[in-house]
Amino acid sequence: MMLCVNIMLQFNHFYKKIDLHIFLKKIIFIVFIVCISIAATGQKVRGFDQVSEDTTEVTSPSIPPSITGKPLSFNQKLGVLIQSDPILKTGFSGLILYDLNTDTLIYSYNQDKYFVAASNTKLFTLYTCLHAFRDSIPALRYVENDSSFIFWGTADPTLDHPYFQDSTVIKKLKEKAKMKRMIHALNDRLLPYGTGWMWDDYNESYQPEITALPVHGNVLTVDKSMGSLTIKPQLLMSDTGRDATLSVVQRKRDSNHFDFPAGLSEWMRFYQEVPYQNAAWINHRQLEELLGVHIDTVSIRLLYEASTMYSWPVDTVLQRMMSKSDNMLAEHLLLCAGMEVADTLDFKQVVMWAKDTLLQGIPQQLYWMDGSGLSRYNRFTPESILFVLKKIYKEFPEARWTALFPTIRKRTLLRASLPVIYYKSGSMSGIYNNSGFIKTKSGKTLAYSFMNNNFGSKVSAAKNATVSILNYIANNY
């Protein structure tokens, strides 16, 4: 209101004392100042840019200056932030914060309590894969002679994947197919879903089936760009329909019948990934199409003398898994790690290997049920997650692990500026967890695990509250 009064007074002053040309210049200037003021008033404060999987706007948290007249310590302020936050206090929170430079515990709150981990489970998958693989992902195991080429899937998720477009493995197989009989050793012991997965998420891109030989990410991709529609794999297009009530592609739960939005042909842009059913057999047929030959099938265990064919660099695939929180990659990479260390595609076997070989001394028992965190049966403590983070920090070069984690950093042209947070988030209804490393403004390196379960708000609100507190830590410790 005062701003409007000031404008009117200046208007009257200009009208009386200056000519029209100067008057118009000043009016334009005043309007410009008003617009800037309004924009600044409505703009949210943001401590960091999340440059990969999450985009969270956060405000600086409000902290009382003292308790009973005494200034609050850093730990007291942190406790106030967590326990008084209107979003987080509706649920159950735990935080552990550790100084990696001095090897000392900074802060802990409910650090030994169990939380549903969601995609923080991928930290255990990441650590296992870093130890299990060498420099490249094993694509296939095979045995060949003069007349035949028999191969076993290793759960390598990159073959003809929508993101990993390199066709080196396909080219090698095509060369073999020109001269030899191709035989696919099927693995019929894998279940399509992990323990505790939601049955009604069958149409969601984040829950494709698990297979020994993934092809094209085990999803139907529907991509319309600049008016051109591409659907892959085409072999799934024999049973489709149109539905005017749909805005997305919908698969029937018990079949590979896909209903498309009736207006899709008129849309300029559209993209969706839809998991298909009976993926193991569909993938076998896709591979026949890719190679242009018939491929026989046989049920036979992996032979001891089998050789290995490799595909993508390990860190390229792990970085994609972490930055996009890709469940399909996580599930198959963990199985693939099992093939590498124990010659078997068995989730229980690879988890047992990781626990016995890599995770001895972990503070609490792990309830580790899958590779991605889709299962609500995954339960870890902040203290156990910190255990894994400390091992990543100590056992691998900083340049390697910092390249694998998504980052939250201050808006600046200088990418090396501090503070920066290397994080892995994990969320589902009523759950938001965030764990990783913080390079603070003062130059210290911290590890943390901040877990929040059973809150009563939207996940986005809990995410904002969590990142706001991490922002405070990064700028004040």
Image (cartoon, rainbow, N blue to C red):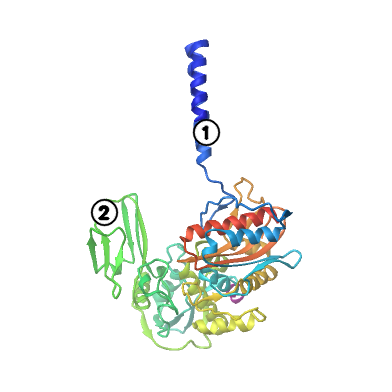
Rendering quarter of residue 352: bottom right
Rendering quarter of residue 71: bottom right
Front residue of 47/284: it is: 47
Q: Is residue 36 visible?
A: yes
Q: Percent x, y for residue 407?
A: 58, 57
Residue at the disc numbered 1: 36
Furthest residue in direction right, as rendered? 102
How many C-alpha atoms fall within 10 Å of the one at disc 1: few (<14), some, or many (≥20)?
Answer: few
Q: Percent x, y for residue 437?
A: 64, 62
Whether residue 394 appears in magenta in the rendering, the answer is: no
Horizontal placement of 268 versus 106: left or right? left
Q: Percent x, y for residue 215?
A: 41, 71
Q: Dot 1 lies on which element?
A: helix
Image position of 413 with respect to 334: above or below: above
How many C-alpha atoms fall within 10 Å of the one at disc 2: few (<14), some, or many (≥20)?
Answer: some
Type of the residue with mark 2: Ser
Front residue of 89/108: it is: 89
Q: Percent x, y for residue 203?
A: 35, 68
Residue 64 badge = none
Decide whether the magenta segment is chiefly helix, strand or loop.
helix
User: Of the residues tagged 2 and 1, which is closer to the observer?
Assistant: 1
Residue located at (59% from left, 59% from top): 84
Residue numbers of the magenta segment: 128-132
Type of the residue with mark 1: Ile
Residue located at (56% from left, 84% from top): 342
Residue located at (72% from left, 53% from top): 69
Residue located at (40% from left, 85% from top): 188
Horizontal placement of 213 versus 402: left or right? left
Residue 265 badge = 2
Tag 2 near tag 1, CB within 8 Å: no
Q: The C terminus appears in which quarter of the rendering?
A: bottom right
Image position of 179 with respect to 168: above or below: below
